[in-house]
Image (tube, coloured by chain):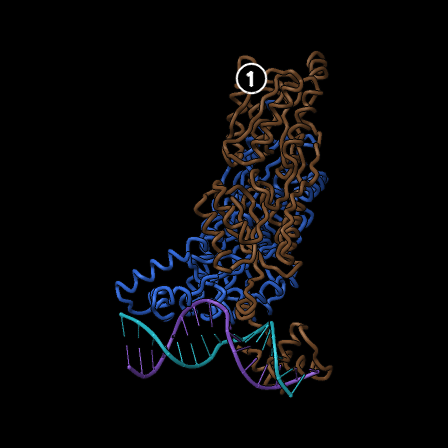
Chain colours: A brown, B blue, C purple, D cyan
Amino acid sequence: MTTIKDVAREAGVSVATVSRFLNGSGPVGADTASKIEAVILRLNYTPNLLARNFRRNESHVILILCPNVTNPYYAHILSGIVETFYEHGYSALIYTTADNPKRESEALDMLTKRRADGAILMAGTTDESVLLSFASRFPVVQCSEYEPSSDFPRVSIDNYQAGLDVMRFLIGLGHRRIATISSENHYISTKLRLQAYQDALRENSIMLDERYIALASKDYSFHSGKAKATELLGLAQPPTAIFCISDTLALGAVSAADEMGLQVPRDISITGFDDVEHTTMFHPFITTIAQPCYELGKRSALLLMEKLNQTTSNHHQIFLAHQLIVRETTAGLGHLDQTASTI
Amino acid sequence: MTTIKDVAREAGVSVATVSRFLNGSGPVGADTASKIEAVILRLNYTPNLLARNFRRNESHVILILCPNVTNPYYAHILSGIVETFYEHGYSALIYTTADNPKRESEALDMLTKRRADGAILMAGTTDESVLLSFASRFPVVQCSEYEPSSDFPRVSIDNYQAGLDVMRFLIGLGHRRIATISSENHYISTKLRLQAYQDALRENSIMLDERYIALASKDYSFHSGKAKATELLGLAQPPTAIFCISDTLALGAVSAADEMGLQVPRDISITGFDDVEHTTMFHPFITTIAQPCYELGKRSALLLMEKLNQTTSNHHQIFLAHQLIVRETTAGLGHLDQTASTI
DNA sequence: CTGTTAGCGCGTTCAA
DNA sequence: TTGAACGCGCTAACAG
């Protein structure tokens, strides 16, 4: 391996001068510079990052904690994070945690061990205290999900408002018997969307029916969505609309309706969330809330680098805009009746 | 930051002893050991990996090059890689290359710079010479795609055989006018599947019709699959079966058939590839080749670690088993005619 | 503008 | 079984 010492010797200068040349950290004479440059090219020298990082006590690596890479929602965020870091010369170390607190803290230990300079958390550490212990010592930003009681930097959409948007849209369509397929997980997004569901009902004086609240699996699986929708639709007084908190769940619900001989949206309106799943591959296209996933990742990365470079402790909490996209799985009750009567 | 020196001082021993204790690299007295252990716990000491890696000239980090994290096929492989490395104490550095040679070599430079000890390549570096230059100096394994002219370690399925399996199945069903939706990319998997398509035709004395070979976008997009299928199905003499080299493409083809008023599989048989996309969400469920994605990633990681630990240069080339899964998008020609006549 | 010197935290001689 | 001393490759003081 060629080292800075080899370069210095060959160029007839000191290692300090080569170092200055490499980093632009001090003045270097024009001809000295070109001499060094020539030697570097000839020797094909590359600085040893292991040594440099050690010396500078920084790794230029950031940690990404993600429950699950195969979930397209996370994959898209991840994409935004990774690309942004790449553009800025950072490397991304990825850990999949499967929502396992032990794995989460083991991954976060990479901060303590100095293998990474900062971290982006893409889902909730169940234990708030461990988050706190790391976030107080290292730059950490929470992406998409976050610990509501903390005021650490975070980037997400306004899940409560998005939930309200969906519900008000459904109610505006004339629906009164509205169910929701939420999830067993304890993510803040899940809580806020459920809260919005309840509040929207209340603000419209619609009585909350506990049987209309179904909890699908933690990872929003298609099959659990389908199963829950089947239950909901089998109720003595079934809902006329179902607010699903993910697209996969909505896809499952559409499938359930289909198998029960129900037509969407004529017999049942269904909404999704995220708009990263295959919402527009087959009819009926899913009405959903679009999240700016790539941007969510990008902004998180940008925010983290900001924290990395300046030690100001102004804690940003960024909300990115979501958008209700009305497609083919929702219809007004009035219109529905009309449609039904024409058959 | 507490260092090994602090621990040594507090425990009243030398740093060498602490180091030996930490690494089990030499004898340490029983009571000395317990004394050190106590201090480590009390001081909450963690070895600085920056220093350790520098000293050992290894990073315990491996590089993963992936064209695109949002493609579920890659995401599943990635999952297998990351989890396996995690279990073995390695960290995974991820680079998305977007099939851009410049980005690929920039990522691979992390090897030269010593930020990573080895690499897993998940898609083809267009330039073979750069692959060669890295693979000859560092442990590198190719996963899923590979450079056929090289004999470096790699893990994949037997794409040629898989293609043959699909084609023989289709031909066995009575199909003669079989089209393929391949891709514009230059991946080895694409080449081999196309080769299998042609060879299967030849071995059954079916004339190859160039108009039956369609090239979809590099990334197997749903829309390009749909567009190509629309063209194919609009031919004067349309195919009775379409062999798509990815599930997304097959989904697109099904959608195209649907919009043209054709019924799958009554009017047209369609096959996919990979079985990671949404092949079983909506009817008709896709007949496809299942790839063991997670296992592909896992085996690649295992193989790489093997190279990392022993410097034997036996180059493994591993083929993992694939499986033809017959579902609802394929039917025999005879059966089809029968079905058709009953309408 | 340039060189000398010191040291980051750790692992590894080698001598005791 | 233990400790003193050295150095990995690089950067940052400081002196010239």
**Image quadrant in which the C terminus of chain A is located:** top right
Q: Which secondary structure, mark 1?
A: loop
Q: Is residue A31 above or below residue B121?
A: below
* Among the 4 quarters of the image, the one containing residue B21: bottom left
Give residue D14's position: percent from left, percent from top.
Answer: 61, 79
Q: Is residue B129 above or below residue A264?
A: below
Give residue B142's position: percent from left, percent from top.
Answer: 52, 60
Q: Residue at x 54, y 20 (%)?
A: A232
Question: Residue beneath label 1, please?
Answer: A209
Q: Residue at x 40, y 67 (%)?
A: B310
Task: Please state the total of marks drawn on the protein image.
Answer: 1
Please report, as a chain letter, where disc 1 is located. A
Give residue A313's position: percent from left, percent from top.
Answer: 62, 51
Characterize the local packing of mark 1: few (<14), some (14-19) or many (20 or more) Cα atoms within 10 angstroms.
few
Give residue B25's position: percent from left, percent from top.
Answer: 34, 68
Q: Residue at x 66, y 81 (%)?
A: A36
Of the pair A240 and B231, the residue shown nearer to us: A240
Residue B59 visible in image: yes
Of the pair B228 and A129, the residue shown nearer to us: A129
Of the pair A234 and D8, the residue shown nearer to us: D8
Residue B296 visible in image: no
**Lateral position of residue B44 relative to residue B243, left or right:** left
User: What residue type is disc 1 on?
Assistant: Asp
Q: Is residue A175 above or below residue A74?
A: above
